Image: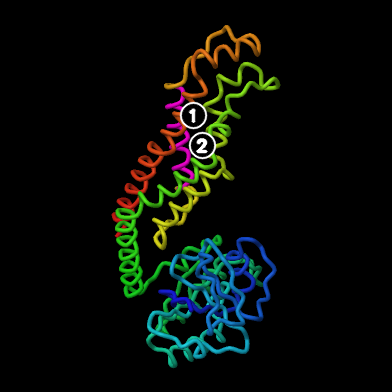
Amino acid sequence: MSSKPLVRVFLFGNAIEEWLIPLLNDNKDTIDFNNGMVFVRNKDEMENTYEYSEFCFVQSLCVPYNTQLIILPQNKNYSDLHPNATDSIFIVDVWTFLNSESMETAKIYRQKYPYTELRIVMVNTNRKTLSTDISDVQTALDNAVFEYKQEGFSVTLIQNNDISKLFFWENRRYKDMLKRDFKEKLQSNINSMEFNYDLHYGFLREMLREDMLQPETLDEYTRYDENAGISKINKIADIAAKSFFGESSLFTDELYSIYKAFTKGVGVWEENKIFGNLLSLLARRFRKDMKQALPSVGKNLLNEISYHEFMLNTKFNAIFTQQCDVFFCDTAKDITKLYLDNLMIKMEELI
């Protein structure tokens, strides 16, 4: 059984199906709204527990880490999921008028679960109103907010699909809990990287040597290609870099596993972009090192015979193979470690 998330948010209201679900449904999957839904950020948080056995689990990058957004099915009550002090109840309605049904629901839940955060969320879905006078619409909105606050409810206003406003925790308790959890996981990752990084990269290095760094595999990059012509040898660093650091390469896949292992639970929202920046950094360094180490190509390579003579006289293949081994076994290891260290430092500054 998976552990409970740090924060569970239970969602009610008339804007759920119309506004919220389409925004959260990244892959635009067909979803049975009536069976209940749980939105999470990571796949490893999508394990069903006894509490959610009939729910539809959906992955969404809009959801923060350590958080579950829960939409109950019609036959299930909030009390069935054993509410606790770390849970929240959001009643999400469309603008612009006060919803008396939502007001009554909010009062009932406040009475039953006084220890949970309860918030009214009003969403602008650009729904047409009977009045075309903007001042009338604003007055209706102001009155609704006033009435909700008079009853002691927190109100959040959302415009232009700014879903991130759902996750500005107004209660300090949530901020402290998230901060403490983030700090603990970050420190755990820092300790793990200090003791286990060499081991992880060592496995990667062995995999590369058995596959990508085999001499016969690397020979494919330097072998004469009648279709590519003589110019191929001038572009070998760029051609190899495109292959080595591409999305489907062995190195990229295995390095991503290392990256995820040491950022587990504390990854930022643009985690793919941050990993992409690491790949770009490695690719630039690879091209630079290759262009400095490989023998320069003159203008005498006119045909296949001169091509082979040049490769033999300069030991081009041997140098290329050696430089690839040095880069992926040592240089890439050091660059990645430094990159991850700096990433952890930046994350610590957020605490």
- The residue segment tinted magenta is 275-291
Residue drawn where x is 48% and y is 50% of the image = 256
Q: Is residue 155 above or below residue 312?
A: below
Residue 268 at x, y percent in the picture: 42, 56
Q: How crowded is the residue under tag 2: few (<14 C-alpha within 10 Å), some, or many (20+)?
A: many
Residue 104 at x, y percent in the picture: 52, 89
Image check: 72 left or right of 29?
A: left
| Count of residue discs | 2
Q: Earlier in the sequence, mark 2 or mark 1?
A: 2
Residue under label 2, please give it: 213
Provide the major secondary structure of the magenta segment: helix
Which label is found at residue 321? 1
Q: Residue furthest top?
A: 300
Residue 285 shown in magenta = yes
Q: Is residue 262 above or below residue 277?
A: below
Q: Amino acid at mark 1?
A: Thr
Image check: 219 left or right of 255?
A: right
The quadrant where residue 179 appears: bottom left
Residue drawn where x is 31% and y is 56% of the image = 190
Q: Are marks 2 and 1 in contact (CB under 8 Å)?
A: yes
Front in this rendered view, residue 200 or 73? 200
Image quadrant in which the C terminus is located: bottom left
Q: Amino acid at mark 2?
A: Leu
Front in this rendered view, residue 17 or 226? 226
Q: How crowded is the residue under tag 1: few (<14 C-alpha within 10 Å), some, or many (20+)?
A: some
Front in this rendered view, residue 91 or 147? 91
Residue drawn where x is 33% and y is 52% of the image = 344
Secondary structure category for the residue under label 1 = helix
